[in-house]
Amino acid sequence: MKFLRLTLVSLTALLVAAALAAPGFIGPRVEEIWKQQLAQLQGGRVSDYERGWFGAEAGTSVRSGDGTTELRSDIQHGPLLFTAGGPRVGAMYSETRLSVEGLAPALRAQLERLYGRLDHSPLVLESLVAANNRVINTLRLEPFTRSDSGGELEFDGGRVRLETDYSGATPTGTIELGALRWMQKGRERLYTDSLSGKFRIRPGASGDIALVLPLLRADSDSGPLEMRDLSLDISAELLPSRKLKLVSDLRAPRIQSATPISSVKQQMTLPQISPADLGHFLRPLLQAPAERNWPRILRRPLQLQQQLAIQSANGPVLLDADIDWAGIAAGVRPVAEAPAQWMEPLTGTATFSAAEQALLQSPLVGQAMTLRKYGLLLEEDGELQMHLQVDRGELQVNGQLLPPDLFLLALSGQF
C-alpha cells in the first residue's frame, strides 16, 4: 500500500514537473510558428513579442489601403490551455483583439457606426493549436444594438470558425450569425433568423460555401414579405489566368407577400473575373441605393450568365441572359439621354418568357401591353416571349433591328 502511494505521488510529481517544464520548451516553437503565420498575412508585421514561461504577449500591425490597424494578442503555451470554451490540451492558445487606440480611421468609423464609441474590441480571434496538430481559428463578433434617426438595429452576434493544419491545406469552416432586427417607430421593418453555413477552401485552386437562412421577414409600404428556407451556394475556381470563375445558386422556395409570387430560383455564373473587379462590383452592395454611382461602377468589364425562374399563382416567369460588358468610358451621359452609347460596350443575348396572366396581373401590365401592341412581346399558346440580341450597339428584338432609344421608350411606357 505504501509502495502504491509512493508510486502515485511520484507519477503525480512527474506530471506536474512535466506540465511546468513543457511551456519553456514549447514557447520558442510557438513564437516561431506565430511569426511564420503572420508572414503569410498580407500587410502584417509583428511589431513586438514578449515571451514568458507560460505565455507571451504580441503586437501586430496590419497595413491596408485604409491605413494601419494594431492588434494585441495574449498567448498561452501548452500543454494545458485555458480557452474560452474550457480547459484543453494543445501546443498553443491565443486571443487576439483590435487595439482601440490603433485602429485605421476607416475601420474605426465602420465599427462605431454599429457599436457606438469603442472602449474595447468588439471582435476577438481565438486560435488553438490542438494536440492533434489541427489549427482552429474562431472569430467572435459581439452583439450590438444601435439607435439613430433610422430606427433601432439589433444584432445577436456571430461566430466564424476555420480549421486546418500547420500547412494550411484544405481549410474548412462554419459560419453562425445571430438574428438581426430593425425596428422603426415601434414597427418591425426587417427580421432575419440565425444564419448558418459551411465553407471549404482549396488554396490556389477552388472553394465553396453554402448558407442557409430559415426565415426573412420584412415590412414595407408595399406590404409584408416573408421568405422561408432560403439557401445560397457559391463555388469559386481559380483559373490559369489568375482570374476567378464564380457560380452561385440562390433559392427562395417559400414566399408569402402582397404579390402572387410563391418562389424564386436564380443561378448566376461569372465565367472569368479578376479579384479586383469582383471587389469593385461587390462594394456598391454595401452602399445605400442613393449612394451608388452607376456610371462609375460600370466602367469595368463584366461577363455574366444568369437563369432566373419565378413561380407565381398566375404562372411562371423566366429570364435567361448571357452578357459580355466591355466597360464604359468616364463622362458618359445618362441612359435616358444616350441609350445607344450605353449599348456600344455590350454584347449578349436575353430571352424572356412568362405566362400571360403572370404579366397582365402584375405591376408590369402597362409595359407588357405596350410591348405586345408593337410586336416586341410575342404571344404564343398563352405565353409572352421576347428575345433580345445586342452586338456593340446594334439591337435586335425578336430578330428585327430596332433603335435602342425606341426600345427604351417602349419599356418606359412612353412610346
Image (spheres, rainbow, N blue to C red):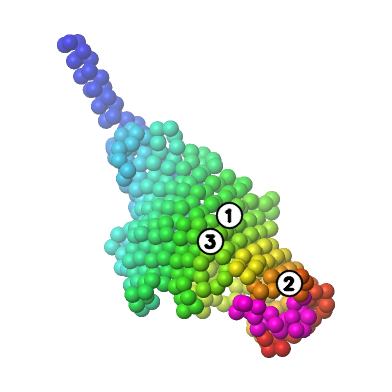
Q: Tell me which segment is drawn in magenta.
A: 360-378
How many numbered tags mark residues here?
Answer: 3
Q: Which residue is mark 3?
A: 254
Q: Secondary structure at mark 1?
A: strand
Task: Point out the image quarter for the C terminus.
Answer: bottom right
Which residue is pictured at 46% across the width and 72% down the height? 224
Point 39% across, 41% down: residue: 128
Residue 54, numbered label: none
Q: Which quadrant would residue 30 be assigned to in this image? A: top left
Q: Is the residue marked by circle 3 packed among few (<14), some (14-19), or many (20+) residues within 10 Å?
A: some
Crowdedness of circle 1 by 10 Å Cα count: few (<14), some, many (20+)? some
Q: Nearer the viewer, residue 358 or 90?
A: 358
Q: Quadrant of the N terminus?
A: top left
**What's the amino acid at mark 1?**
Ile
Q: Which residue is mark 2?
A: 382
Q: CA distance from mark 3 to mark 1?
A: 20 Å
Frontmost of labels 1 and 2 is 2
Q: Please rate how many residues cluster around mark 2, counting C-alpha atoms within 10 Å: few if below 14, some from 14 to 19, many from 20.
A: few
